[in-house]
Each structure stands twice: as structure tokens, then as C-alpha cells.
Amino acid sequence: MEHIRTPKVEQVKLLDRFSNKSVTGTLHLTATHLIFVESNSTSAQEIWILHHHIASVEKLSLTTSGCPLLIQCRNFRLVHFVIPRERDCHDIYSSLLRLLRPVSYDELYAFSYNPKQNDQQREEGWQLIDLAAEFERMGVPCDQWQLTDVNREYKVCETYPRDLYVPITASKPIIVGSSKFRSKGRFPVLTYFYQEKKAAVCRCSQPLSGFSARCLEDEHMLQAISKANHNSRCIYVMDTRPKLNALANRAAGKGYENEDNYPNIRFQFVGIENIHVMRGSLQKLLEVMGTRSLSMTDYLVGLENSGWLRHIKAIMDAAIFLAKAVTVEGASVLVHCSDGWDRTAQVCALGSLLMDPYYRTIKGFMVLIEKDWISFGHKFADRCDQLDPDPKEVSPIFTQFLECVWQLTEQFPQAFEFSEWFLIQIHEHVHSCQFGNFLGNSQRQREDLQLKERTYSLWAHLLSEKQNYLNPVYSLSFAESHPVLEPSTQAYHFKFWRNMYHQYDRSMHPRQSILKHVLTLKESNRELEGTVQALKTKLQAFGVSTSPLKPQTPPRERSLPSRPQSLILGAPLLSRKEVQQEEDEEVLGEEAREDAPASTDGERTVEGSSATENGYGELTGSFGSKNEPAVVTLEFGVARMTC
Amino acid sequence: MELSEHIKTANVEDVTLRRPFHPALRGTLCVTSHHLLFSNRKDEASWQLLILLKNIDAIEKRAVGSSGTITIKCKDLLVLQLEIPGMEECLNIASSIEALSSLESVTEMYPFFYRPSHLTLLGPWGLSTTEQYYKQTERLWDRWRVSKVNSDYSVCPSYPSAVIVPREVDDDKLIRSARFRQGGRFPVLSYCHHSNGMVIMRSSQPLTGANKKRCKEDELLLQAVIDGSELGYIIDLRSAQQAQQARMTGGGFESKSCYRHWKRIHRHHERGKVVQESLIKLVEACSDLSHSVDRWLSKLENSKWLSHVHSALSTAGLVVECVERDGHSVLVHGSEGTDNTLLVSSLAQIILDPASRTVTGFLCLLEREWIQAGHPFQQRCAHSAYSHARLKQECPSFLLLLDCVWQVWRQFPLALEFSEALLLRLAQEVYASNYGTFLCNNEQERCAAGVKENTHCLFQSMLKPDIEEQYLNPLYEPTDLAIWPSVHPQSLQLWTGMFLRWTEYAQNMEEAREEVWSIVKEHRERV
């Protein structure tokens, strides 16, 4: 709190990013949030920005109307305030600079966030995901794979979890020897077991082969993996890096497997670029998308030049290769990149998702993230810039994974139990530092921080509002008939994910959502069914037979039993949160309201007609000029409805 | 020459057919005057494939040993292959297809021969007429009238016989105004807004020419449109520079000094050949099987198709803004007033008018604003994206409209009563049809060819209850509000249902749609 010099500034203008519209309101600065409350009483919108979400704050040069403050968030929100007095602006600015750069983990929101749960509930939350049970689900341990305790004390590899699964023929000396020959000690371990063909997906980091070094234990290790699969002796080794990068690594004493030294391997480069390229690519993408009155040509050229979708496709291609090798050829695959925690996590997780319908359910997807990302040490703290940032370590690796999944949901609308809002919500919380799951860089660090005792689990929170994330057209029979997804990699399937990168640019989104609407219908179907059942039971209790027609039970009765109001057709689907839980979900709630059918929504009308005053000036202003710009920048750039 | 004379080989056995989503089939190929039939059964009455020859945009033949392969590319973007044993048969079939798919004479076309048992040629043709529209639209009665000045199509060959004009302007003035407008397309009413009585007019460009001619009657006509209110807008669908240049060839624009109460806004729209080439490039890009994202994006950009969608929606938005928000009447025109003009005026109505968002309302809108208003369908839709023929007057304006409507539906999925299926059906029918609706270039030609007496009306058949059902949007919830689409490039998308229609992607989408339907049906039954 001592960092906050000015907790409240009035008469602050919030400028719309893509039009000349603005609203006036009050800015509040709290220990955890920056809050903007619009003064207009009829449509008072509130914006809550968690400090952890802020990526950068910029004070622009003074204008006649005040001092502009530009805030960029990690969830791709961009807000532009104009603060009347420069001193206030400076106060806010410097407070924010301090607040968004926490120096110790204790300062993170997760350690102060309290959703009013008791310890038991908290513990239950953390027990939701059990990786041992997950390996059991895959059929491990089995006659070929076993749990090893070499890393129980994090002695062999400190970025790996304690429990690791290896081939039964891999003895401790082999494991230890292999780990010494692998970058950061990340030796080959099992991450997914394809029971049907007894084929394994293993992951590791690059070998320290340099130009000629060998390691017998490491060779034995691969041999053991190969022996564990009776279907196919040959194992694929996927180096997810471009060949050039791998070659360059050799000069530093690292590198890749020499096929001559490892019998039965098929070595393959995949060509996913490194974290620096990905960071640059996203930056370019956001720059283009943030341009005002962007033309169609600039949009498409910018999309191409950013290379973003090319990278997404590269990851997808790799995952498809992996899934094919395992499911079609029944071969085991070893995946690595340099350290084996970025590209390797992407490819293993996405590949497993293609192979196993379980990972396409809400619970299964949580398990997948917990396994391939959290437990195997994707460096969330570094990549997501949680603490004491090194800008060179930040990279949207996990975002890319979520996007790949989204691209799949677009291609297979019935294959996933969850909708894109689930993915977006996870992305939100990877950066919010509100829950303990993603804090730190490895399991070991998480244990040191005692996260399970001191913070709450995101998964419990998400499961509690599961109905908001359901995909209404999810079909179990589709999952049964398509256990393995075979996505097309035609270029036209790769689309720009507007709802992620423009989540907060309200003007850009459809004002009506099929998803939310159908979800409401489905929910209401379920309710009606429930009511009918309840009434039947009641009647039976009174000794009335339920089979004949019963005019005395009008269908209207269905509104009698009490139920959450959100289920009423057309009402906001996401219920508003309690104040202490408010945060960014608030915004989702806001959106849901917009997405509700028009006829039930008075507010939109207000918004539309109040917007009316603004554009006219622009309209008349455009008459005089001889060379009209081809692109219209008027008000109707905004999707809306008016009377 | 009889049509049958084009057919040298009517039947070929042992032909192999390859097409998307189906295993290769072996069977008999048969060419008739209007159709290509393929059957793999002895039973003649059943067939696996029936294509209107008019639907065929291009064919490519290739010899493989003694047999030949014909690749058929249809105007609805379907591509299929026929392997025909015997080179001679192959060449004969190919030349029959070439000759019969490009018939020029309207009365030889299939709609004149299509006689299904469930339809009758008796009774009125079409959904509505100008007079009926006027009668139904009470808000017009006060200040507007139906003029029959064009009853013999002499004033404007491309207008219908009846048009709606300001009550106080007599027919003589209309004739004079028509002489001052390209193709005689004087300003007529297109839409009158239900909430404030403001109107959208459309016309062609005025023939001011290099020496700035004036026409008093034309000025009076427009003056009568705004009737004392201080301002109207002219949305000129050309850039200011293009409008200036048009004067050199006898065209021009309404100058400020002559039309004092009208303000002119220029919005550049591509037309004709440029748009046709966009379509060709887009379809080419969609059938490119290379897997490079960069190449795809660059081809998509290069086609400029989405840019046309973007400008059409933007300008329609501008028109709506003038009418609905600012409460002013609007005149829309480009050069000829038969393409972009209709595109913009009909899109504006979709955005503004809830009545045009129902199945019937939408089809009526198309009938009024495209068919009666004289969009030259025969010229514009002679060829589609695959044809190698030299472009004459082809332009996919209508397809562009359907794409724009699809974009609106994407953004307001509950606001339209019809579904994508209706748009897809129209996109197909406009190029090749059993029905007479899209034949000819205007009402005059349709009259001369006897279209109304000798063909069936597509729209009527689509509105038959059992047929209409397949075009309904399960989620439809009528709204009286104007629906303003967002025109950020990020908000516009490739119309995959159309352009990627023959891919597996479309099939997955179809299944998802069916699931939505079943949820809605379940809900209706429960409630």
C-alpha cells in the first residue's frame, strides 16, 4: 500500500482504441487492481485491471486535455487514459511501475487472494488433479514401464517432477548417466502412453553431443525405450528445432543425436522457431492489429509478415507427425528441443490431445496442462514475466499452445467439451498470478513456496463455473468415432484468433453469440427435463399416475422451482461475481450480457443511441475533402444495434 | 440448329467418376440437351449425379493412352473428373458440353423446359410487384406514388414498368430526368425507413458531361425527395477523381451549386472486371493445395475479395448512418446504377429493416432490388471463377452481396430468419438454375422472352413450407433494431461455407449445425 500515492483520480477520460469515442470516469488504484468506473450512471461500465496483468505503462507527452497514460496488458487489453492533471498522472504512473514489478513471490496476488474457502476446500481443490492417477489411466506402470524414484529428492533433475516413468530396463545408473549427457539433466522420460499400441511418447532435452561426444548410458536409455515397445523397435527422435539451430548448438557442446550411435532411431527435425522469434512474432502481430482504421490489405499483409500463423502451423504439423507415428505406425517417439520445456511441451501436449479424447474434456485438459506444462517444468514465471523480469526470457509459448487447441476447436466443432472461453480464461490466469498453479518455474520451486498451503488452485475455481465453458455441440459419439483427430493442415484452416487478441475490444465482436445462445438453450433443456422429473416424482408421491395427459400441470409450472437466474433464456449466462472475486471475470460477465439476445437487452439500445452523437461530426467533416479515404473510419466500424 | 445436334455421343459406358467426399464410381455417362447424367445402375431412372450443363464453367480434357479424362469445373465451385474409355467418345462429350453449356438464347435454356409435377405455370409469377409493395407500405402513401411512365420500357429499358417516385413529380419531369441519367435510370425510391420516413433512392450517374449540363427536372425530383428538410446525402460509389473523369465521357456527378441541399460523399468501389478477377483469384487461392500459411495469406490478400466485402459493408453502414442516425434521405449511385448501387442499397436495408431479414422479406428484397431493378444477371453471371473465356461483362456483384449478408449473419447470428443454406442455394441458382428467376438482364427482356409465362419462379418454390424449412435459422429471434456490423478487418472472414464448400471442413461444420438444430428442436418441444 505504501506505493500508492494517489488512490483516486476523478474526471479521467478513457479513449476507445479504435474510434474517437471516449468516456469519463474515476480511476482508483488499489493494492491489487487499477479500477476505472465510468461516471455516466445509466451505463456505468467498470474496468478492473489486475496489476499482474499489466505488461507496460507508458506516459505520453502532455496534451491540451491532460496527460495520456497508455497501459498494455498481458491479456491483450490496451487502455488509454487521459488524466487531467499531470501530477496525478505521474503519481499513478510511478505507483504502477512499482506495483507491477513485484520483487518477491510473496507480493503476488495469489498469496493475498482469498475466495472465502476453508482449508479443507482449498486442499480438495489441490487434490483435483492427480498425475499418478493419470498415468494409471494410461495404463502405466505396466510390464514395460515403471515408476522410478531417482528424482524423489530432485537430485537428478531439479526441473522435473519427483515421480517419473521410465522403461523397466532402464536401471538407475543408466538414468543418471543419461541425465548427465542431457542439457539441464532432463533425461528421456515417459509423458504419454498409447495403450492400444503400447507406444510411448517420451520427452527430454538435447544431448550434450557436441561434434562427437557419446554417452553409452544415454544410448542404452533410448535402447530401453525402443525395447519397451514390441510393436515397433524403431523409435522416432523428433528434434523440434530448425536444423540450423541444432547445428549451432553443437558448437556449444550440445546438439542432437547421431543416428550412427543410436541404433533403431529415426531422427527428424521439425523446425519450430525459438522463444525469441515467437516473442518478436507476437509483437509484430499485436502492432498490426492495434492499428487504427486498418485496411483489409494491411491486415492480411500484416498477418502474413508477423509469421504468427506460420509458427502456429509449425507446432501443429509437429504434433500431427507425432500422433501419426504413434497411432498409425505404433512407434514410440522421443521429443526434444534445446532444454525440453518449451517446444517439447507444446508438441507433446498437442500430440497427446490429438491422440486421446480424454484431453479434449474439461477435466482432461486440466490434467494435460498439469502434466506436460506444470509438472515438467515449463518456466511459467520466466515466460509469463511473473517476477523480476528478464525480457529475453518472456515468450508466448503457452499462448501458442492454447491457440493451437483453438484452431483445432474450429476445425472440429464437436470434438471438445470446452469452448474457447475456457482457453481464454486459462490464459487470463496464467498471467493473473491469482492462483498458485502457474507460479514459479518448476515443481521444486512450487514446493519451496508452499503454494498448496498458501494459495488456491485454479482448477477448482474453473470447475466451479464449468457450465460457462461448455461447448454446447460437444458430442460424445464424435469422440468415440474419432478417437484420434486428424486435422487438415491446409493453410486456410489457420485463422486469426480474434476473441483472444481482441478480447477487450468490444466493438469488434459479434453482438450475438451462437455459442452462448445454444448453451442457454441446452441448459434450459436440462432444467426442463429436471422439472418434469421432479413433478413426476411429486405426483407419484401423491399417488397420481403420470402416464395419462394431465391438463392440471401446465407447462408454465417449470418456472416454479428455484434455480440460478442465469439459466433463464436470454439472461447473462455468467453470473456476476462477489466483489472480492470480481476481477476480470467481471468483464466476461459484461460480455455475456451483450451476447444475450437483443430483444431482452435494453442497455444496448442505450449504448447505440448514445453513440449516435459522436459520429456525425466526422461525417460532416468528411465532405469537403476531395480525396476520400477508401476506408471508412466512422462510427459504424462498431458492431452495434440501435432502434 | 436443334440442341440435340450438338450431341454426337449421347451415352458412354464404363466411365469413372471422381468427386469430393465420394469413392470413385464406375457407370454410364449420358449427355442430354441440358444435363450431364451419371448412373452406375441398370435402372435408368436413378442417377448418382445430375448436373445442369449451364452449371459447367470450364472443362479440361487430357488424353491418357486410348482413353481420356475430362475435368469439369462447375460454377458452384465443384470440381469433378470423368475418365472416359475411348478418345473419340471423350472428345465428343467434351465438345457437346462446351457447346451446350454456353447457350446464348434464353428460350433454349433449361428453365423453359423444366416442368416438375408439383409446380404449375398458372397463377402470378414472382412474390410481389411494385404496385403491391406500394400498397403494403402505408408509410409511402402520403408523399409517394407509383408511376407507370415506364410501362412500355421506353423511358428506361432496365427499369420495371412501375416505379415509386415523389408524389409531386409528374411523369413528364421523370422523362426529362431519365434523359439526364445514364441508361435512363432516374432516381427512384428503394426504401423508406419505418421509424423516420427517410428514404434511400437509387439511380445512375447524371450526364453532366464536360460542359456541366444541368437538368432542372432532375434537380426538382431530388428536391421533392427531401421535401423541405434541409439536407440529403448523395453517396457516389466512385472516388471523387473517378467522378471527375466520368465527365469526359459524358457522365458526371451532382454539383454542389445545382443540388444545393444535397451533400455528396464519394466512396471508391471496384467494379466489373476487377471484381470478377478477384473472384477468380480467390477461388484459385482456395484450391491451392500447398500448405504454406504465408502463401495462402498473400494470395488471399492479393485477390482483394475481402477488401470488396469490406468496402461494400462500410458504405452500406454509411448509408444507414445517414438514414437512421442522422435522419436524412440518401441517393445512392455509381455509374450505371445496376451493380454496386444495388449492392449498397440492399445491404443497407438488411441492416436497417427487420422486414428484410425474414426469408420472405429477403427474397422480396432480392426480387425488388436486383431482379426488377435490372441487375443484368445474364451478363454478370455468364461465367464464374473457372472459365477461361475472355471476360466480357461478368461481375459477381450478387455473390458479393451474399457474402456481405453472410458476414452480417456471422455477427448477428440470431437476427436473420434464414440460414447460410439459403445464401448457398442462391449462389448456386444465380449461375445455373431450373427456374426462370435469374434469366435475362431486366424486366423488358424477361417480358419479351416470355419468362413469366414459360418458367417457374425460384422464390415461390423456395417459400413452399416443406422447402422453406431447410433455409430457416434455428436461432432466429426477430429484433426491430438496426444491426450494424463491425467492419474492422478482424471482424470479417472468408466465407468458408461458400469458398471451401467442397472440403471436409464444410462437412464438420454441417454436423455441428445439425447438432445446434437438434438442441433447438428439443428446446421447442420441451417449452
Image: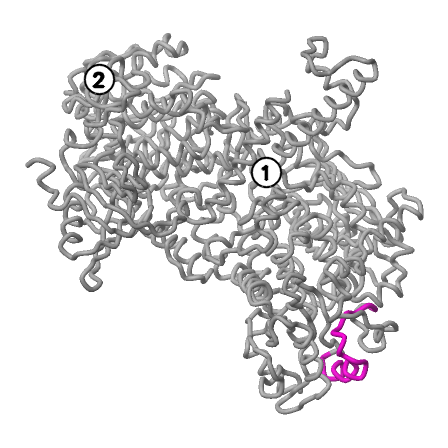
- The x, y position of residue A628, in whole percent, is 39, 42
- Magenta-span inclusion, residue A182: yes
Location of residue A545 by image quarter: top right
Residue that label 1 marks: A21
Q: Which residues are magenta?
A: A162-183
Looking at the image, residue A122 sits to the left or right of residue A359; the answer is: right
Label ID, residue A621: none
Q: Residues within 10 Å of mark 1 (few under 14, many from 20)?
A: few
Name the residue at the left extreme: B1
Quadrant (top left/top right/bottom left/bottom right) for the C terminus of chain A: top right
Marks 2 and 1 close (CB-CB < 8 Å): no
| Gap between marks 2 and 1 measured at Cα | 47 Å
Residue A40, image quadrant: top right
Residue type at mark 1: give it. Answer: Lys
Q: Is residue B362 above or below residue A360?
A: above
Nearer the observer, B108 or B401: B108
Magenta stretch holds residue B391: no
| Residue found at x 62% / y 81% | A256
Residue A524 located left or right of residue B323: right
Q: Amino acid at mark 2?
A: Ser
- Is residue A289 left or right of A593 when viewed as pictured? left
Place of residue B467 in the rendered image (x, y in percent of width and height, measured from the top left): 40, 25
Q: Which residue is mark 2?
A: B161
Residue at the outermost bottom position: A212
Residue at 65%, 43% in the rendered image: A65
